[in-house]
């Protein structure tokens, strides 16, 4: 479709992105994308012809609960409006006064928006004041009645708003789940060669064992003990390969997020199996230090694996460049007095002081070909189940990421 | 063909057991080790064999193990097995003097061919070692005489060159024949050229 305005818009943006610096993220507005803005970044060094363009609906950025109902928010870039969010609370319609409240340019190189927040004063705001006491009793009664009906209407509106809010939240969560899935599939590519190696082992055993068994049955007087031994070894090896494939398939399966009561040790062991060969190839040690009995938490096991995988990958990347003799990653599970903790520590150079506080921000990255989504997603996935993720540099070098999960009882209570 | 001991080093136990079982059905003697360090600690230079080792193992790789064996004068033929068709690793392995490089899963016939060729190599290596020891048993003067004999010089010519009597040379030649177990000049030539060729590394 040569006349598709969105396509034309994308082309003009793409040509502008081509002139960006490597690693730079810039915001673009385009008439074809009304009410949206686009973030553009050049893809990796390896593929200079490609660009990453993220389309963002700023309306979804507004946290319903955090924004007061009276607020009228306007987001603009160089005078062009990106978002114009009208006040939802009472008095939005019959306003008689307008009072500017807040105006500031967002301190961000990639998204330098101007934010204007305005409060509109209404009749209701004024008549609600205590000095109304001077009015005659009759008028007061009438007014009270009036206010009462207003309140009823407001309540109804609030309910409607809550429903809309819940819907939007569900929508966001769905997006997040989809993004999580996409990143898992992406990450699996890096693991592919390691997994191929892991699958080769059982196949090697199967082949040699079967060929041995064939030779055994073709001899005149085979050792009666050897054949069953070979066959049961084959069964074991086939199951081992099957389990490996299942772990991989589960990891990239597209599915609803489903928090269940899970053993954290098992989750750590599962992801360790997936990454082991890759780390071995990169000559990075993996140490598991698991508490007994295993700490438990209400988590989605696959998403928890994903969070750990992300931390392991980052640690491995940091170690890859590190100039230390001991290159290893340590995963611990800890059972504190309440809740559960998983810690990932590496022996790398640690995290720079300027990067440390911004690590979990979306689109913040220190990697030349990174998108800056991994850790932001990690934080989001952990917070979704009531947990918290934190990072600090280790006194002896390297970084420690701590995932603190709420106690099981608390989650059950919250669910009721 | 002469059969030798096979040393199999792989960190994956089921793989070890499967390959061992297969080779046993061919009547071969296989000793298995779970890691290079254990093998290095147990290897006996007096029990030569062919080495079958996984390239990628934790701590010490197959190649590093091979190098450590060479440092200890153990140059037995080594076959590397690997789960990856990694061209660079393969090139490094051949440069380091690896006899063969097999990719997992390994087919029976490919494995047998590699092992047979390893056995032949080992036989030659051991013969050379034997020859070396024979040549080393000669005195310096005997060695000098032997070289001249091999170059086709007559006893008298050697006597003149070394400024001794022909009888002395004859006595040396008798000693040489005694030590090497042959008096044929053709055998002398073969032995010395084999000895000169070894060690290559």
Image: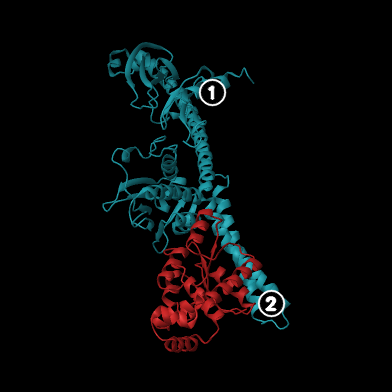
Chain colours: A cyan, B red
Label 1: which secondary element: helix
The residue located at (38%, 30%) in the rendering is A66
Up the image or down, A397 lies above or below A28; here it is below
A121 displayed left or right of A191: left
Q: Which mark is residue A243?
A: none
- Front-most of residues A104 and A32: A32
Q: How many angstroms separate mark 2 from mark 1 (CA)?
A: 67 Å
Identify the residue position indicated by label 2 in the image: A216
Up the image or down, B28 lies above or below B177; here it is above
Q: Quadrant of residue A112?
A: top left
Chain of residue at mark 2: A
Up the image or down, A179 lies above or below A295; here it is above
- Front-most of residues A250 and B116: B116
Please state the horizontal and vertical placement of residue A9, each as a whole percent of the image: 54, 20
Q: Evaluate whether label 2 is on the same chain as label 1.
A: yes
Please state the horizontal and vertical placement of residue A80, each as a whole percent of the image: 43, 15
Q: Which mark is residue A10?
A: 1
Residue at the far left: name it. A395
Tally of marks: 2
Please state the horizontal and vertical placement of residue B132, each as a whole percent of the image: 46, 78
Label 2 vs 1, first from the N-terminus: 1
Up the image or down, A333 lies above or below A78; here it is below
- Front-most of residues A24 and A53: A24
Please state the horizontal and vertical placement of residue B27, each as a whole percent of the image: 63, 80
Q: Quadrant of residue B79?
A: bottom right
Which-is-in-front pick, marks 2 and 1?
2
The residue located at (44%, 17%) in the rendering is A81
A270 displayed left or right of B20: left
């Amino acid at each position: 479709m040569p006349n598709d305005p969105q396509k034309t818009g994308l082309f003009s943006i793409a040509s502008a992105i081509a002139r960006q610096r490597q690693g730079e993220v810039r915001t673009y507005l385009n008439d074809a994308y009304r009410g949206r803005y686009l973030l553009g970044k050049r893809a990796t060094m390896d593929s200079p012809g490609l660009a990453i363009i993220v389309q963002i609906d700023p309306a979804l950025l507004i946290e319903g609960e955090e924004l007061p109902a009276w607020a009228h928010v306007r987001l603009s870039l160089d005078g062009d409006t990106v978002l114009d969010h009208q006040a939802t609370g009472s008095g939005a319609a019959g306003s008689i006064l307008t009072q500017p409240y807040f105006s500031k340019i967002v301190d961000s190189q990639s998204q330098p928006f101007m934010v204007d927040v305005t409060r509109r004063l209404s009749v209701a705001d004024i008549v609600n004041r205590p000095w109304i006491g001077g009015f005659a009793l009759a008028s007061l009664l009438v007014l009270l009645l009036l206010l009462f009906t207003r309140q009823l209407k407001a309540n109804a509106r609030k309910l409607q708003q809550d429903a809309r809010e819940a819907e939007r939240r569900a929508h966001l969560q769905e997006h997040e789940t989809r993004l999580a899935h996409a990143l898992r599939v992406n990450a699996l590519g890096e693991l592919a060669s390691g997994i191929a190696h892991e699958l080769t082992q059982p196949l090697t055993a199967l082949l040699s064992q079967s060929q041995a068994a064939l030779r055994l049955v073709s001899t005149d007087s085979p050792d009666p003990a050897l054949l069953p031994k070979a066959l049961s070894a084959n069964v074991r090896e086939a199951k081992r390969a099957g389990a490996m494939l299942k772990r991989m398939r589960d990891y990239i399966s597209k599915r609803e997020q489903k928090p269940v009561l899970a053993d954290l040790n098992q989750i750590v062991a599962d992801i360790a199996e997936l990454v082991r060969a890759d780390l071995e190839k990169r000559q990075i040690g993996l140490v598991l230090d698991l508490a007994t009995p295993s700490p438990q938490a209400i988590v989605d096991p696959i998403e928890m694996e994903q969070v750990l995988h992300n931390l392991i990958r980052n640690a491995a990347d940091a170690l890859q460049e590190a100039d230390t003799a001991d290159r290893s990653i340590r995963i611990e599970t800890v059972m504190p007095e309440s809740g559960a903790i998983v810690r990932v520590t590496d022996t790398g150079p640690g995290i720079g002081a300027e990067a440390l506080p911004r690590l979990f921000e979306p689109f913040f990255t220190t990697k030349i070909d990174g998108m800056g989504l991994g850790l932001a997603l990690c934080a989001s996935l952990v917070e979704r189940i009531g947990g918290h993720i934190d990072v600090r540099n280790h006194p002896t070098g390297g970084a420690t990421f701590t995932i603190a999960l709420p106690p099981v009882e608390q989650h059950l209570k919250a669910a009721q | 063909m002469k059969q030798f001991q096979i040393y199999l080093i792989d960190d994956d136990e089921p793989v070890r057991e499967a390959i061992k079982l297969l080779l046993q059905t061919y009547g071969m003697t296989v000793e298995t080790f779970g890691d290079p360090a254990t093998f290095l600690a147990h290897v006996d230079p007096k029990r030569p064999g062919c080495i079958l080792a996984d390239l990628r193992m934790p701590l010490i790789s197959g190649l590093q193990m091979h190098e450590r064996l060479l440092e200890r004068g153990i140059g037995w033929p080594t076959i590397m097995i690997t789960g990856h068709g990694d061209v660079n690793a393969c090139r490094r392995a051949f440069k380091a003097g690896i006899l063969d490089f097999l990719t997992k899963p390994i087919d029976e016939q490919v494995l047998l061919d590699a092992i047979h060729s390893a056995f032949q190599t080992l036989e030659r290596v051991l013969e050379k070692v034997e020859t070396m020891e024979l040549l080393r048993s000669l005195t310096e003067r005997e060695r000098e005489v032997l070289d001249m004999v091999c170059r086709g010089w007559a006893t008298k010519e050697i006597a003149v060159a070394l400024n001794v009597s022909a009888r002395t040379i004859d006595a040396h030649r008798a000693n040489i024949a005694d030590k090497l177990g042959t008096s044929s000049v053709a055998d002398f030539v073969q032995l010395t050229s084999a000895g000169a060729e070894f060690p290559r590394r």
